[in-house]
Image (cartoon, grey):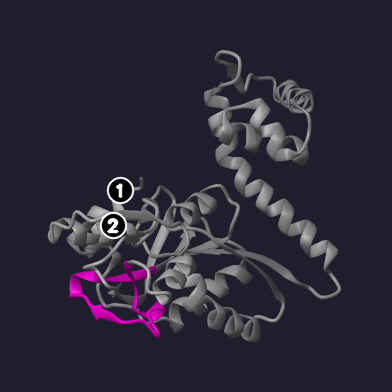
Amino acid sequence: MFKKLSTFKVVYETKNFSKAAELLFVVQPTVSAQIKQLENELGTTLFIRNGRKEVLATPQADLLYQKTGNLLDDWEDLKFEIQNRKDKLTNCNIAASHTFSIYLLPDLIINLKQCFPNISFSIKMMNSLEVLNALEHHDIDFGFIEKPLSAKNIRRLPLFNDQLVLAGNPSIGPWLIREKTSGVYYYTQRYLEENDIQKETMTVQNNEIIIALLKKGFGCSIISQRAAKGLVYQKLSEKYSRQFYLITREQDASSELTSVTRWIQKKSDFKTKSSKHISKADTALGNNRN
């Protein structure tokens, strides 16, 4: 049953049997057969074919998908607990945005492992939107983002402040900018528009590549001050100070993982303002998930 539910989850998310088969490393007829078996067991139709490739989810599929994520999470946790019953390990999957991953996550993980030795941590680095999507799809247990994104059934809690700076020589360029779904993209576009800058831009989807280029004297970029060590930079105004956020699902996780997120909240340097009273800049940024 759980194998069929896992297949269903991928088909629902891709809306494509062939694509689902590629992601699951099986042939397409296997996917079709598992979905058909699941439909027979449930006595309902889950997908309606729309053309040669795309499929449409039925209301019954929507309901099943809402429940499947938690069900599969519980099953994976149970399997992990049984397989590691001697050590009594709990599995915890974390994803973090680029800047947080490089400059804050290493120390945090070391401290977490010292405080929670019976938790096995797994780490992924993504941009902010990818972290949010992974959390919504139950691919991770919680995440850290630098863009105040919002979604249904997701809690967003402010953590550390992060000051942005302008590194490199803006009179020469080119401007090295992150992809649109990254946390710093909004601030870069804002700076370019406010200062009527029309110079060449180059999209680089990795902070470390940007830093490496800047260290070689190539280009300029708006980056975290944490990343600017050894670089010539100018500090920007307070409106270019952002926050990192912890995001979790509203439905409580296991008691062990809940203890982890509570520990992170207590150890972080919270701002006194509520996330309901974020700045206009954050509001504009949070409303733009694309």
Q: Residues within 10 Å of mark 1 (few under 14, many from 20)?
A: some
Amino acid under disc 2: Tyr
Coordinates of residue 109 in the picture (x, y in percent): 59, 78
Check residue 288 in the rendering and tell me which mark sits there, or answer none.
Answer: 1
Q: Residue at x 26, y 61 (%)?
A: 187
Image quadrant containing the C terminus: top left
Coordinates of residue 106 in the picture (x, y in percent): 56, 79
Q: Is residue 9 left or right of residue 160?
A: right
Amino acid under disc 1: Asn
Q: What residue is disc 2 on?
A: 186
Check residue 27 in the rendering and tell me which mark sits there, or answer none.
Answer: none
Residue 230 colored in magenta in the image: yes
Q: Is residue 191 left or right of residue 101?
A: left
- Which comes sooner in the sequence, label 2 or label 1? 2
Q: Is residue 160 above or below residue 150?
A: below
For residue 114, what is the image quadrant?
A: bottom right
Q: Secondary structure at mark 1?
A: loop
Image quadrant containing the N terminus: top right
Tell me the mark number nearer the camera, choosing from 2 and 1: 2
Coordinates of residue 123 in the picture (x, y in percent): 61, 66
Residue numbers of the magenta segment: 220-244
Q: Is residue 45 left or right of residue 4?
A: left
Q: How far apart, in angstroms, are the residues tagged by discs 2 and 1? A: 9 Å
For residue 161, what is the image quadrant?
A: bottom left
